[in-house]
Amino acid sequence: MTILGLARRSGKIVVGCKACEESIKRQTAKLIIVAEDAGNSTKRNFWHLANKHHVKILDFKNKKSLGELVGFREAAVLVVTDTNFAQTIGELYKSGGE
């Protein structure tokens, strides 16, 4: 099980554009992860929201791989709502892990 899968099972992951936007605007988002093959408007929107609301944002290789890590077929974007999970995922991302 990956750290993203564990976070999902703990209820600390929000998946889907609308739900993620709401989480960011409610200031519950601690980390945003956007698939590199998400639509340009989706990527642009979430980068804008990340900057506006001061939330860290990471790129992930593709929607299929991102979705599979959290139990979905695909996911263009997801939000981590827990500070500890967000920090751990950020550290793993920097070191090249999942």
Image (cartoon, rainbow, N blue to C red):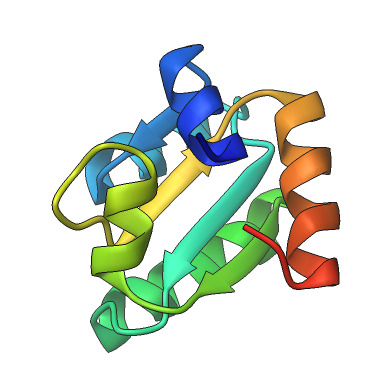
Of 51 and 38, which appears nearest the observer? 38
Image quarter where the C terminus lies is bottom right
Residue at image location 30% in from the left, 87% down from the top: 40
Residue at image location 62% in from the left, 29% down from the top: 27
Q: Quadrant of residue 34?
A: bottom left
Most extreme residue toward the front, as rendered? Answer: 1
Asked if 15 appears above or below 95 in the picture, the reply is: above
Asked if 26 appears above or below 1 in the picture, the reply is: above
Of 84 and 5, which appears nearest the observer? 5
Residue 76 rendering spot, x and y as whole percentages:
29, 63
Most extreme residue toward the top, as rendered? Answer: 10
Drawn side of residue 82 relative to residue 59, left or right: right
Residue at image location 83% in from the left, 41% down from the top: 87
Residue 22 rendering spot, x and y as whole percentages:
38, 33
Of 25 and 16, which appears nearest the observer? 16
Asked if 35 appears above or below 87 in the picture, the reply is: below
The tally of labels here is 0
Residue 13 rendering spot, x and y as whole percentages:
46, 29
Q: Quadrant of residue 29?
A: top right
Residue at image location 70% in from the left, 63% down from the top: 97
Drawn side of residue 84 relative to residue 82, left or right: right
Residue 38 rendering spot, x and y as whole percentages:
28, 77
